[in-house]
Image: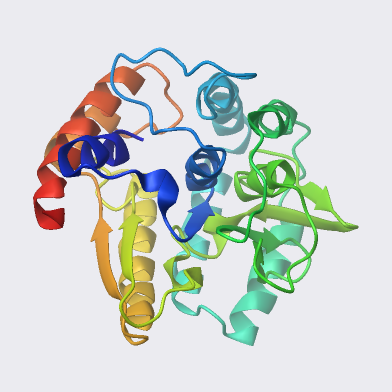
Amino acid sequence: MGVLAGLEDEAGLDLRRCEYFVGTSAGSIVAAHLVAGRRPRRPHQAPEPGPAPEAPAAPAGRLAEAGAAAARRAGAFALAMAGAFAPLALGLAAPGGAVLRGAMLRRLPRPAHGLDDLRAQVERSGARFDGRLRIAAVDRQTGRRVVFGRPGAPAATVAEAVAASCCVPWLFAPVRIAGREYVDGGVWSPTNLDAAPAGRGAEVLCLNPTASLRGGGEMVAALRRIARSAATVEALAVRSRGAAVRVVGPDAASARAMGENLMDRGPAEEVLSAAYAQGVALASGWR
């Protein structure tokens, strides 16, 4: 939100007018927020008037609470699973990779905690699939990616798709859509950049918030490795179609503000301010 807001203000853009939006996990909340006609949140800005608070605000406390509980329950198991998904991120469409991914997902314990509050909030925002929005999730049974909103994808509401895309499989109960269970799109790729329907002459901006995570813990190192590797491969795929691609991770100030615990709501305003400054600096490339 911060990077987009800084980019808008400095470059005079309105990112709600983008041709397409691709959202994965927390990014699906931001994409739905824009499709619903809401501007990215600015530092120290009150929520926009409307039928519901801005999309990212309500689920954050629930995520922090669930993350802490999962850490106590799962411990090393969650670390092992995160590390195991790392090499699969590079086998983007390999059938063998999908089979293994599905087998791993089915073996994970099924958490009781869901994302009903997030789903309800996105529903109230009024976000709808209007042809521009793509939201990535993973079929828990097959291990394959499904991009909701893309032609031929299973029918779903934006609220259902966002909840599925945010459903970290060892933290939250899978989301059932049309008789199948779906989990976090980040299990396939942190960005799913290759799902952008971008061709020759298109300009693609990919925000990759886990690419510059600080700290040396196993989980942080695994997330950083996955984020960088997958985005590099996917950017090459999109560039091969003739599109210009810019991948942006947190700069040093944003990474410091984010810290290692992405479930911690405490530094949210500090992160927003640092990211806004990063977006302002980034805007020089759009002039």
Can the viewer see residue 267? no
* Vertical comparison of 47 with 255: above or below: above
Residue displayed at 37% across by 86% down: 241
Is residue 270 left or right of 37 when viewed as pictured? left
* Vertical comparison of 43 with 207: above or below: above
The spot of residue 274 in percent (x, y) is 19, 29
Is residue 104 left or right of 23 when viewed as pictured? right
Is residue 177 left or right of 36 when viewed as pictured? right
Residue displayed at 63% across by 40% down: 127
Can the viewer see residue 34? yes
The spot of residue 143 in percent (x, y) is 68, 69
Q: Residue furthest right?
A: 179
Specify the quadrant of the image occupied by residue 171: top right
Q: Of 147 and 140, which appears nearest the observer?
A: 147
* Vertical comparison of 31 with 253: above or below: below
Q: Of 59 and 76, which appears nearest the observer?
A: 59
If the image is split into quadrants, where does the N terminus sit?
A: top left
